Structure formats: C-alpha cells, structure tokens
Amino acid sequence: MRNCSELLENLAQNYKEIYSFITEKANEKKDFFIGIRDNYLNIYYKCASVVRISLVKKKPVFTTHVKYLGKDDSGLTGDEKYEMIGFDELKANWSNMLERIDIIQLGDPNTKETKRSHKRIEKVCQQWIVNEANSRKESDWYYVDLEYTMEKTPTGRFDMIAVSKNTIDEKHHRVALIELKVKDKSYAGMDGKKAAKYEKELETIKNVKNGLYGFEKVKLGSGIVGHITDYLRFLQKNHYKTLKQEIVNIIECHNKLGLLNNPELSCISRITSVDDLAEKPEVHIVSYTEGLNNGQTNDNAVTIRKLKKSMYKYLFEEPIKDKGIGKTSEYCLERLINPGNIEGFYNLKKDLFNDDNNIKCSQPIQTVNGNTSFDFDFTFVEASSDDAWNCLP
C-alpha cells in the first residue's frame, strides 16, 4: 500500500538535511518526480529512479543502480545491479548520476550512438508529461504517480495515474489510468515464442467468455494487446478500491512535501477520503507521433494517420484494403482473446479512421460486484503542437 508518511515524519524529525534534500527535489517540478511507495520513495529523473530512499531499523538507506555510479553492470543480475550508498556519496555524485541518466535515456550527444529504443523514448516522454502538467496552472489534471504497479497482482505496470482538478458532481474527482505509446512500433508486443509457451492457456482465453480473467499470469506482451488486457483484469477484480486509498495516501504525502501549496492545487490538497474520488476510473491509451524531450521533436515523426492504422492492425484481424490495411498482426487483440471480452472496442473499427483524435468507447466487464461498463479513451497527440503535454480530455 503506497504510503510514505512514516518515512517522511522520521526524516523531518531526525534527519533534517535529508528531508530538505527530498523536498528540494520534489519542488523542482520540471526535472524530478517523487514516487510514493510502501514506506519508501523513488526520486525519478527522466523516468529513471535515480535513488530509492527507505528506512532500515528506522535509519535512512539510499539505493541506486550501479550504472548511475559509472560502474559496469554487465554480468550482474537482479539485486546485484543495485548498490547502497551514503547520503554524502549521493550528494557528491548527484550531478554525474543525472548526466549518466541523460546518456542512457537520450543517447550520447558526443558519439553517433544517439538513438534510443522506443521504450526509452516513452520513458522520457512519460515524465515530461507529468512534470509539465503538474507545474502548469492551466492543467486540468494532477498526476499523482508514474510507473504504477500493484503488489501481488498480475495486472502489469500503468505508466501514469492522474486526478482531475475539477469534480464531476461538485464532489468526486475523476481518476485516469494512463498508458503511453510513442510512435507506431510501440503497439507490438506478443511474439510466436511467447504464444507457444502459453498455447493451452491462450486457447482457453480465446474460446471461453471471461477466460481472460482465469489466467492472470499469462502476459500478452508489452504492446497495446497486453496493456488492454491488464486493464481489463485490473477492473474485473475491482483493484480500483485499493488504488483509491493509495491515491489518498499519495496526496497526503504530496501535501507534506509542499507540492500542493499553489492555490490552483488546493482542490487536490482537499482530497482526504476515497469518497472524494470517482466511483469508477477511466482508462486512457495516449499515443504520440514522437517522443518528447523538453518539448522538442524529431523530423521523422510518424503521422497520426499512421498511428491509427497501426493500432488497428494490433486490435482487429479483418484487413481493410481501402484504408491501406492489407494485413493485420497474427497476435492482435481480436485473435488472442474471446470477442466477448472486448465488445466495446468494436466501435474503434470505424471510429479510428475519422478525423477525431480522441475516440471513446465503453467496455462492459463482469466484475466481482456485477456487470459494469468502463470508459476507454484513445487519444492521438501531435508531438510538435504547443500543448502536447495536455494529452487527457
């Protein structure tokens, strides 16, 4: 359960220099983001966790990846890749650590090796969106978390969680679960090797209504198919109830760190109960034509039209030749799971090809509390636009 109150109170009372370091970084809203975890926190820079701060026997402990310290991590696995360092060492190495993250996430400008994978591009874009939105008065949303995972539940990792500043009915704030995609290659996920590994399970998922939920450990890749099914599983099991309490806990911690002192964020600071949050979350799949780095784009960005065509190929199995789609993915959503699990998404077959860059559909899900419909938003963003950070409707 995400809550750092004990950690923050301990540091504020007994380790004032460390507490000041954290609050200083927390309020540098254009560069850093504080991820609130289960009595520890992560300081993110370009969506890389520079350092994890936790308590061991009520004393602060700092953990970082060895590569951020300039050490070779080849041959290391799991926990071997992480190293505990002292606070003085952290301060002394801080600038160098950030420079190394810049190179890892963005490429080395001093060499020809400047291209990064789409996953690196997405990470940088992800935190850019969060930092921009949270530092702007005109933003309609406040981002409470990035890289969200729920412990002991096989529902994947959600890129961002946001809460609306305005309420729906003078009481409840909207909650957005957000998956970010950059360029059309990011929609791919499942491959033949993985499909062969789960052959029997996939056959059940494909043929049995609600079979998807009986095989939660079957991951359908890291592309759009896998993410949609993770959301369906999350909603079906009503994990949102836990998430709401975690959001309340995170906002309490953000208040303690001084992140909500600005008048335009007073509406967020007043969220103190799960009753202040919407009864149901919204799911948002946000696609960018190119990754962003401080608002800059590359010249070879794909078009929104190409994004939509590629998304169709990974959702549906029927080719549409007059739209230039002669072949779809062998591992598209419609081929991998029972159509009864994705009824609401069939509206996208037509709507993906209109001129609207925000497309909505409502997906019914048989949850533990009965049959409920959830809103899914598919938004396409031109990365070169001045308000590209504003990606949620």
Image (cartoon, rainbow, N blue to C red):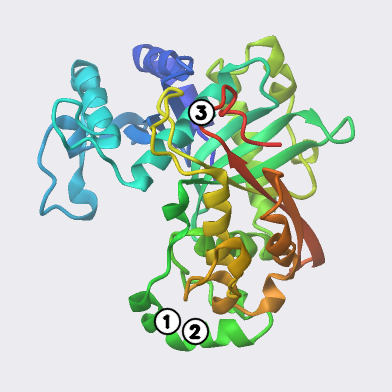
The residue under label 3 is 384
Q: Is residue 268 left or right of residue 41?
A: right
Q: Position of residue 390 (x, y in %)?
A: 62, 29
The structure residue drawn at horizontal position 39% and vertical position 31%, both measured from the top left corner, is 44
The residue under label 1 is 198
The one nearer the camera, 223 or 304, is 304
**The residue under label 1 is which amino acid type?**
Tyr
In the displayed image of the protein, which residue is found farthest to the front?
322
The residue under label 2 is 201
Q: Toward which corner of the image does residue 389 lie, by quadrant?
A: top right
Is there CB contact under 8 Å for labels 2 and 1? yes
How far is the residue under mark 2 from the one under mark 1? Answer: 5 Å
Depicted 175 relative to depicted 28: above or below = below
- Which class describes the residues within 10 Å of circle 2: few (<14), some (14-19), or many (20+)? some
How far is the residue under mark 3 from the one under mark 2? Answer: 42 Å
N-term-proximal mark, 1 vs 3:
1
**The residue under label 2 is which amino acid type?**
Glu
Q: Position of residue 123 (x, y in %)?
A: 40, 39
Q: Toward which corner of the image does residue 388 lie, by quadrant?
A: top right
